[in-house]
Amino acid sequence: MPVKLVCKIFRSPRHEGMYLYVASGEGLERVPESLLQRFGRPVEAMTLLLTPGRQLARCEPEEVIRQIQQQGFFLQLPPLPGSDMRELAERNDKLPR
């Protein structure tokens, strides 16, 4: 696995919080057509240099890099309702347990 990977991140116009990560040099060529139909027309959100240990909001960069190498893309799904608050509460040491 390379130490770093330049990737493009696309957001779904149909599903809030759904993102598609692909290698910058390959683009969407390895993403299955069936996924693109459900995803909607991808809207480019950003280009990012992924490195192990880089902080991402909802996923581990090593997993993103691995999936992009193996299948050509990484699909980030929206969080389950209430999951963000639960995670914040678990990390907050000021809340009673």
Image (cartoon, rainbow, N blue to C red):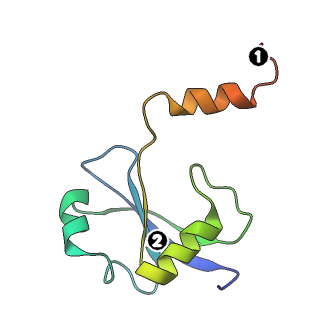
Give the image location of residue 27, x and y in percent: 38, 80
Instruction: Establish if 52 lies above or below 23.
Output: above
User: In the rendered view of the protein, which quadrant contains the C terminus?
Assistant: top right
Q: What residue type is labelled 1?
A: Arg
In terms of depth relative to the viewer, which is nearer, 46 or 70?
70
Q: Is 22 on the left-hand or right-hand side of 3? A: left
Instruction: Establish if 47 lies above or below 56.
Output: below
Q: Disc 1 designates what residue?
A: 97
Q: Is 34 on the left-hand or right-hand side of 79? A: left
Q: In which quarter of the image is residue 28?
A: bottom left
Residue 47 visible, this angle = yes
Q: Disc 2 designates what residue?
A: 8
Give the image location of residue 88, x and y in percent: 66, 30
For the point 41% across and 51% down, the residue is 77
Q: How many labels does the image show?
A: 2
For the point 50% across and 74% down, the residue is 67
Instruction: Establish if 56 lies above or below 24.
Output: above
Give the image location of residue 60, x and y in percent: 63, 60
Q: What residue type is labelled 2?
A: Lys
Q: Is mark 2 on a helix, strand or loop?
A: strand
> CB under 8 Å between callouts 2 and 1?
no
Q: What element carries label 1?
A: loop
